């Protein structure tokens, strides 16, 4: 998987793909991870550790790396 992408590109990809990702079973949220150099990746939060949840989910979107993090269900407070 590629490393990181420029932050402006990551933000644009997040805007473009968040709704589509959030419609997928097991996806609880979409965020941006940023490194010390100011580059980033998409962080997709999963509400299940079921390996089938990740099937068909991308490792890269429009040149931006995608990382998957199990966070459990996310609820409004």
Image: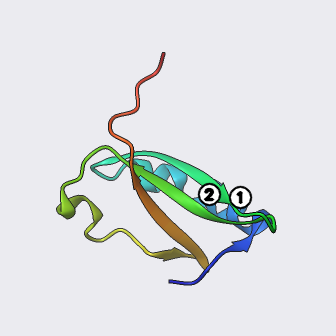
Judging from the image, what secondary structure is the residue with disc 1 in?
helix
**Label 2 CA crowd tier, 10 Å (few <14, some 14–19, many 20+):** many
Frontmost residue, 45 versus 62: 45
Extreme front residue here?
Answer: 36
Q: Is residue 42 above or below residue 31?
A: below
Q: What residue appears at the point 71 percent right and 63 percent down from the top-left corner?
A: 35
> Which x, y percent locates residue 60?
51, 76
Where residue 59 sits in the image (x, y, percent)? 44, 75
Residue pushed farthest bottom? 2
Indicate the position of residue 28 as horizontal and vertical percent values.
39, 42
Image-based side of 67 in relation to 11, left or right: left
Q: Quadrant of residue 16?
A: bottom right
Residue sitting at x 61%, y 79%: 3
* Residue 34 placement, left or right of 20: right
Q: Which residue carries the number 1 mark?
A: 11
Residue furthest top in the image: 77
* Image point (33%, 39%), residue name: 72
Disc assigned to residue 14 = 2
Q: Nearer the viewer, residue 77 or 11?
A: 77
Q: Position of residue 37 (x, y in %)?
A: 81, 68
44 left or right, relative to 16: left
Question: Which color scheme is applied?
Answer: rainbow
The answer to whether the residue labelled 1 contacts the one labelled 2, judged by CB atoms less than 8 Å apart, is yes
Look at the picture and state if 74 lies above or below 49. Answer: above
Q: How many numbered badges does the structure rendering display?
A: 2
Q: Secondary structure at mark 2?
A: helix
């Amino acid at each position: 998987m590629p490393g990181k992408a420029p932050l402006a590109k990551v933000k644009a990809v997040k805007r473009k793909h968040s709704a589509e990702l959030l419609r997928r079973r097991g996806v609880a949220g979409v965020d941006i991870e940023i490194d010390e150099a100011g580059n980033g990746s998409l962080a997709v939060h999963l509400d299940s550790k079921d390996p089938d949840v990740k099937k068909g989910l991308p490792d890269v979107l429009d040149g931006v790396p995608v990382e998957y993090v199990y966070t459990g269900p996310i609820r409004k407070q």
